[in-house]
Image (cartoon, grey):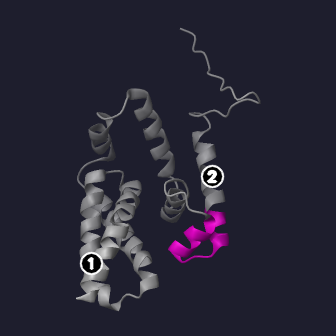
Amino acid sequence: MERSYEFGEFVRGYRETLRKLAFWMCGDWHASEDIVQDALMAIHRRWPGLDDAGRISYARTVVAHLVIREVRGRGRSKEDRWDEEAEACEEEQWADRLTVRDALAHLSARQREVVMLRFWNALSTGEIAERLSIPAGTVRSDLTRAYATLRMLLQESFPPPDVNGHVAIPLVAS
């Protein structure tokens, strides 16, 4: 009975975090809900053998593997999924989201996860290291490499501001 209570508490505490992780990896809220549900079923089967410290790490690993399986097996293209989401966004915001998402797709899975934990969950490098069970130096290295990649890929779409904080918008001759 206590195991069921513990698992229920785990689900209440981490379901949304796992869903956000799945979303950032696959880009589809509906698929992320399904992935998390499948992940929680898999975690429940292994629950008695998981120690307290390893549960969330195991959960993130299961979610990541299920996302990879989902993306590989999905019949729909990314453009189809983005078209569904586009209805909820204004055109300019949507273009920016697509640009950033395309840039994030160039990162490794771990770099995407580290960036997501840093900016979506606002975790420190130490907290990220603890959650992912990797050294803090590796987190810093992954963040540095991810920033460099994103900076290179996004510099045309999002030019840096000048010293006064103004962004130069190129004029197109018509």
* Residue 35 drawn above or below residue 41: above
Looking at the image, which residue sits at the far bottom?
A: 49
- Asked if the magenta segment contains residue 138, the reply would be yes
Where is residue 9 drawn, in percent x and y? 32, 75
Q: Can I make out residue 43 in this image?
A: no
Residue visible at 34% across and 91% down? 49
Residue visible at 22% across and 88% down? 1
Report the magenta residues as a range. Answer: 125-142
- Kind of residue at badge 2: Tyr
The numbered disc on residue 147 is 2
Q: Can I make out residue 71 in this image?
A: yes
Looking at the image, which residue sits at the far right?
A: 163
- Kind of residue at badge 1: Ala
* Residue 65 drawn above or below residue 34: below
The numbered disc on residue 42 is 1
Tally of numbered tags: 2
